[in-house]
Image (cartoon, rainbow, N blue to C red):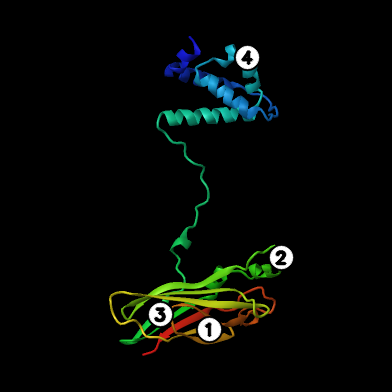
Amino acid sequence: MTNDQNASDPRGRLAAIRRLIKDISDFDALDVSGSEADSDMLTLILDRVLNGEDLSTRHPALYRRLLANTELRQALVDALASIEAERTGQFIPLPKGSKSDFSFLNTRGPLPMLEILDEHHWRSTWRSTLEQIQAVFSPRELGYRADAAQLEDPWFTLVRDEIDAGGAVYAVALECTLSSQIDEGLAVFLDFAITLAAPSTPPKFPIQASLRWGEYGESILITEQGRSRFPDIPLAAVMDNDYQNIKSGLSLTLESHS
């Protein structure tokens, strides 16, 4: 029977695979270190076996090399098992590992407390715990400030959320980066945007924003949509004496003016 005939004969190919696996299983020999050509040899052996050839008679040197190499034998058995499973529509189970924890996908940032005081007067407060702030950034990342290889300072998002109040949706983002104006400090910015839920009178400005974080406490007036900046925060106000750990959570309050 020719190679082409073997390739088109599933029964001949299956018989060759089973015969080879039986020979490998029955063989017990000391391991012989492989070479860089083992992967090429594995490809060659697979090609011959899938053509239904009997390696022991048609390619005795190749067959002896296979039996003498433990890693090559195991790789061939795995490859043949995978091919046979694919042919029969079976699936080889993946190795069992530790269960992954994806709870972070359902973990939200600080939730707002919204108070509707009257038709045009509302107040919303976000509170982040110490653990939530520590999860946002680590003091070690602040040490990169003196690294000449650092092209730009990192940004950290402390609050990002939306609230629906007074017929409008307010998008809020509180972000910080390393200050370029004071030594050992953070520059803090508040991004503020409004989307009207329905045609109506635009919300009135100004809106007061208050930030409390550790020993830091400042308020600013937002007079229009866009980006506003809080006074810079000295690291000593929010971190311990060694600048190794954040020492408290924070709160951000927005309040409209009637």
Write the residue at 65% across / 70% down.
Answer: 142
Q: Gap between marks 1 and 2, in whole Å?
A: 32 Å
Q: Amino acid at mark 1?
A: Arg
Which residue, given by chain and number where applicable, does mark 3 sit on?
113
User: Which x, y percent locates residue 243?
Assistant: 67, 75
Write the residue at 47% across / 70% down.
Answer: 109
Residue 89's mark?
A: none
Write the residue at 70% across / 76% down.
Answer: 242
In the picture shown, does residue 199 fall above or below 29?
A: below
Instruction: Specify which label sits upstream in the sequence, 2 or 4.
Output: 4
User: Which x, y percent locates residue 164?
Assistant: 35, 76
Mark 2 packing: few (<14 Cα in 10 Å), some, or many (20+)? few
Which residue, given by chain and number where applicable, does mark 4 sit on?
60
Q: Amino acid at mark 3?
A: Met
Instruction: Specify which label sits upstream in the sequence, 1 or 4.
Output: 4
In the picture shown, does residue 161 fall above or below 182?
A: above
Q: Amino acid at mark 2?
A: Ala
Instruction: Specify which label sits upstream in the sequence, 3 or 1.
Output: 3
User: Which x, y percent locates residue 32?
Assistant: 70, 27
Which residue, given by chain and number where applicable, does mark 2 sit on?
148
Q: Gap between marks 3 and 1, in whole Å?
A: 15 Å
Q: Nearer the viewer, mark 4 or mark 3?
A: 3
Q: Nearer the viewer, mark 1 or mark 4?
A: 1
